[in-house]
Amino acid sequence: MGLFAYALAGGSFVFIGAWESLISFPQNQRSASSATTAQQPSQRTKTRTTSSASSSITSVSVCFVSFFFILNSLISMFDALKSRDRTGLVLQLEVIAIASLFFLYSMLGLLSHFKNSILLPSSILNLLCLFAFFEEFFLFYLQRKDTSGIENRYFDLLLVPIGICVFSTILELKTPKSKFSRTARGIGLILHGMWLVQMGFSFFSDAMAHGCSLHEKSRGNYTVKCKGHPEYHRGRAIATLQFNCHLALLVVFIVGAYSIICRKTGIEGDLMQYRPLGAEMQQLDGQARFTLDSDDDNEDGIREEGNLEDQKTVVVVPGSEMNGHDSH
């Protein structure tokens, strides 16, 4: 594919994942509850239009990326035919099948947004997306062109973000109204894109591990071979270290973005609503006592003064009773 293809595909995945995470982020619960009761029909229509526009942007982006993969695979197929590389030809056919599923998913999503006569349930679209992620997972899990090549380590680590996308899509099928599954899928797509960019630099640039080199049978069939066992071991260790660095960078970015969004939307304000313990303290009969109000309310709303002591639990601090006794 080359460095440019990996960089373009990875950047597109990062954009789609970031957009999915932002539009699915839960809004402030207080403002959402008050806005629901006071919202006018015109405002509700505007909200649905905005949500549809956000989903259409995702569909257009997925359509562009899948079409790019199909075009790139077709070019690689002609190169494999020219080089008489049967393995490369089969690999590109598998990539075209996966990209076609994503392309169908995006096109059906666009038709559902722009054509009211074609309204597909979200479960069907999510199921189609799940099949595409499953096929991509098995493509990289079973891809062993050269068992000794260190590119297999990069493919194994790529299974982590793909697995996150599979798991989050299954959760979205189970709970379609939950936004956290869509957020998790966006995070998985971001990590997927970051790792694709890293693979491009590790395979097609000077950032390749020392003592290793790229060997291409065709445009889409390549392997990274090293001089000896120490070089192979170091190359796999470098791949693991690079993935850990990408994962740590993503965690730091998510935590920072989450805190900023929470501060701007006021979500953290809901977590700070509590009654101080000092509000329950009461002074009774000049002694240091406090009462815990009963949770059971009277049906008539009137509490007789004679039964006040029966409705409260009185705890006497031992130190206060010592003041009433004569010292000897």
Image (cartoon, rainbow, N blue to C red):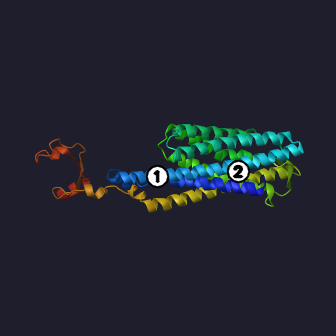
User: Mark 1 sits on what residue?
Assistant: 49
User: Mark 2 sits on what residue?
Assistant: 68
Residue type indicated by callout 1: Thr
Q: Is residue 311 left or right of residue 107?
A: left
User: Which residue shows up at 35% across the image and 56% down it?
Assistant: 273
User: Which residue shows up at 38% across the image and 54% down it?
Assistant: 43
Q: Is residue 78 left or right of residue 178?
A: right
Where does residue 151 sit, x and y in percent of width and height? 78, 48
Q: Secondary structure at mark 2?
A: helix
**Residue 266 versus residue 130: which sits nearer the camera?**
130
Q: Mark 1–mark 2 contact, CB under 8 Å?
A: no
Residue type indicated by callout 2: Phe
Q: CA distance from mark 1 to mark 2?
A: 29 Å
- Image quarter where the C terminus lies is bottom left
Q: How many numbered marks have been drawn onto this rendered protein structure? A: 2
User: Which residue shows up at 15% across the image and 47% down it?
Assistant: 308
Where does residue 66 sit, x and y in percent of width and height? 67, 47
Q: Which quadrant of the structure image shows residue 201?
A: bottom right
Where does residue 230 sit, x and y in percent of width and height? 85, 51
User: Which residue shows up at 57% across the image and 41% down it?
Assistant: 169
The answer to whether residue 325 of the structure is visible from this angle is no
**Residue 232 versus residue 258: which sits nearer the camera?**
258
User: Could you classify mark 1 by the number of other residues whose Cα lies within 10 Å: few (under 14), some (14-19), or many (20 or more)?
Assistant: few
Q: Secondary structure at mark 1?
A: helix
**Residue 118 versus residue 98: which sits nearer the camera?**
118
User: Could you classify mark 2 by the number of other residues whose Cα lies within 10 Å: few (under 14), some (14-19), or many (20 or more)?
Assistant: some
Where does residue 28 sit, x and y in percent of width and height? 41, 55
User: Which mark is drawn over residue 70?
Assistant: none
The answer to whether residue 276 of the structure is visible from this angle is yes
